[in-house]
Image (cartoon, coloured by chain):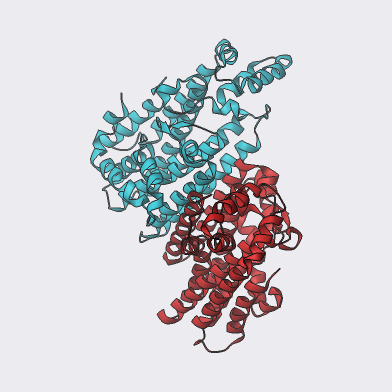
Chain colours: A cyan, B red
Amino acid sequence: MGIEVILEPIQEQLGKVEERLHNDLSSGDTQLADLIFHIGKIKGKRFRPALLLLSGKCSGSFVPQHIDLAIVVEMIHTATLVHDDIIDEAVIRRHAETINSKWGREISILFGDYIFSRAYTILSALDSQIATLIMSQTINTICEGEIVQLLRRYDSDITESEYLSIIERKTASLCAASCKLGAIFSGANKRLSEALTNYGLKLGMAFQIIDDCLDVIGKEEEVGKTLNTDIQTGKLTLPLIRLVNRLPVNRKESACELIFQNGGKKTNSAIIDLLSEHEAIDYAYESARQLVKKAQEEISFIPDTIFKTALLELGDYVVDRER
Amino acid sequence: MGIEVILEPIQEQLGKVEERLHNDLSSGDTQLADLIFHIGKIKGKRFRPALLLLSGKCSGSFVPQHIDLAIVVEMIHTATLVHDDIIDEAVIRRHAETINSKWGREISILFGDYIFSRAYTILSALDSQIATLIMSQTINTICEGEIVQLLRRYDSDITESEYLSIIERKTASLCAASCKLGAIFSGANKRLSEALTNYGLKLGMAFQIIDDCLDVIGKEEEVGKTLNTDIQTGKLTLPLIRLVNRLPVNRKESACELIFQNGGKKTNSAIIDLLSEHEAIDYAYESARQLVKKAQEEISFIPDTIFKTALLELGDYVVDRER
């Protein structure tokens, strides 16, 4: 099922988010207009705004702040992507040229900072500080996860649980925060808010595992972004960690050499053969599927509505997209 | 007069800022400890915390939030420096190795983001949103100023007033915000708060003009940071803009060629000779001196106290330091 169909119940609110995103990014200086126009026209899946809005509807009614917050989580996600694309030297993102490729590293750094601060400006207009606190802690967690991932580059001793801790922080934390904000601004009680937060966390982890699989086996024209960046930048992700762990001790070293030496090349057929031989991609997909199942179980007690159904379907979408 | 002597009246509060800076940056992940230790031990002049604290004392009494806010403005300044040092490829800052030189570009990007989000976490614990609003708008303005400066690189048509607009945004805005926050958290009335904000803005512009002069004529061992980065990265600053404007039309092009061609070299004796011949450095110093005078006039109506004296002396310090 396509994501547009799944998100049908919140189409109207997502439309409002879309309308305001560009305006809320605008600057008083016309020299920034090209940058803002470019980032505005690159339309992502709006996955995090969707999580926030659906969690809100599963917890009660919408308040105007839900739209503000949906814009904030999308802006923060976008800011992290602008910075990530410098780190990964990515050329394509969301089927369009990256800011890094079009304007260079220096402007990308500052434009990422600019987007972050626009998001905080929206947060500072809300009547409580709770969202500012949740978002600043979340960005902190994201940065920690990303820094630790960088510090562990080319480290073939990285374990599956260390990998899971990294992706929980760098990706799942923002999905969890999106669900949490949606829930608490609809007045969710503690149990409901925690269940939705846990749902977001597990779904976010599954999302990243699949992203990491697609980075190895996906096709750029389908996924819509520069792929093969993990191996090229020395990041061992779940399928590769699984592969290394499955090999006998005497073959580990040569496999790691193969992974990192081949990293510079666009086609990695030797690595893909090895992954296939050891069913490492299947293993990663199965891990993601288990996480989605647990995420769906977290919210099983919530009364059935079209919004809950959408959340459940988003889970399946995360695993089945674009393979 | 040394800055330590000038800041004597707020020594106790600056001590508290120093004590808490390191703790407030700490992470739950021990793998970040080296980064946080390194940034913590690099002690700057704490110019912005000083502006905030002195403005507070000129407006009334200290409240506990003054220390929080002093930490916030220093953190935000530090985060911008971490990102600037990537852009300028600087090796030395505050007499120590930069994060960029020691850990590389990727980690520097994320660590800058990390410091920004720690600052917002402190802001989110305050009981009002006003500081979050002021800081997010200020960071926005800083980024705008820096982006416009980058977009105008190698553009010899840049005017003095465009330069002043850039430095007002990229540097002076944070000095102004520091004064403003100090004032309003001491309950300053509108006139006092605006006067101190204007003082900070003008002083900040003078500060940047002198910084830009030192970038051309300073000695690295005295200034304590990598110099000559402006010319190397194509930024025309006030002394160079003055020089270009003073030359007859038929010499402008060759002067610009000389500036940018020589940019790669550490010694720029031909440029320095030209600047000297046209008294362009003197002109920039005089511009800074005029701005300091105007800054000092802004606060002339404030009753005389040791805190006001310190603000006035900071003005003279800004121009006379390290030449």
Q: Is residue A267 above or below residue A292?
A: above
Mark count: 0
Q: Is residue B166 above or below residue A177?
A: below
Write the residue at 41% across / 27% down. A224
Residue A77 in the image: state x and y as whole percent. Answer: 44, 42
Residue B146 in the image: state x and y as whole percent. Answer: 51, 54
Residue A294 in the image: state x and y as whole percent. Answer: 44, 30
Q: Quadrant of the C terminus of chain B?
A: bottom right
Quadrant of the rendered image containing residue A271: top right
Q: Quadrant of the N terminus of chain B?
A: bottom right
Quadrant of the rendered image containing residue A159: top right
Q: Is residue A276 above or below residue A225?
A: above
Q: Nearer the viewer, residue B265 or A304?
A: B265
Residue B125 in the image: state x and y as whole percent. Answer: 49, 62
Write the residue at 63% across / 70% down. B282
Q: Is residue A301 visible?
A: yes
Q: Nearer the viewer, residue A272 or B3?
A: B3
Residue that sits furthest to the bottom in the current view: B303
| Left or right: where A1 falls relative to A108 | left
Q: Is residue A180 visible?
A: no
